Image (cartoon, helix red, strand yellow):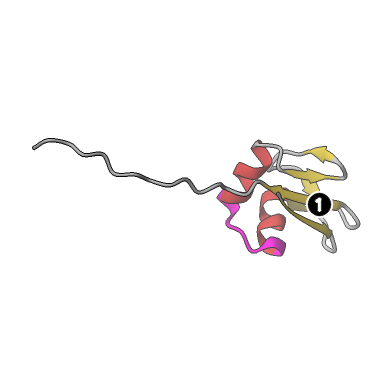
Amino acid sequence: MNKQIFIAKKQKKRADTYVAQIAGLSRSECARLLENGEILINGKSASKKQQINIGDEIIISRRKMELTDIVPENIPL
């Protein structure tokens, strides 16, 4: 699991917008992570509309995707 911790330095921005800026992610990616509970603000799950305050602790925990071997199937033509 990949974990990043940030302390907010700006106030009154939406969680999805602020996290996108500090973590280098798209807003839609941040919204998805927030919905899945992979972004915590002050130790709690948050919504994408939640306002960020100076000093808030933001923890992003992204699961590493496992690559699987793709094996072709022999299909008679």
Estimate the x, y position of residue 41 in percent, counting from the top left. 82, 45
49 or 40, which lies in front?
40
For label 1, the crowd category at 10 Å Cα-Cα, with few meaning under 14, some 14 to 19 and many 20 or more, is many
Estimate the x, y position of residue 27 in percent, counting from the top left. 59, 53
- Range of magenta residues: 22-28
Q: Is residue 47 magenta?
A: no
Q: Residue furthest left?
A: 77
Tell me which residue sits at (67%, 55%) in the image: 17
Tell me which residue sits at (88%, 57%) in the image: 54
Left or right: residue 10 versus residue 29 is right
Tell me which residue sits at (84%, 59%) in the image: 8
51 or 45, which lies in front?
45
Which residue carries the number 1 mark? 58
The quadrant the C terminus occupies is top left
Left or right: residue 66 versus residue 15 is left
Left or right: residue 65 versus residue 19 is left
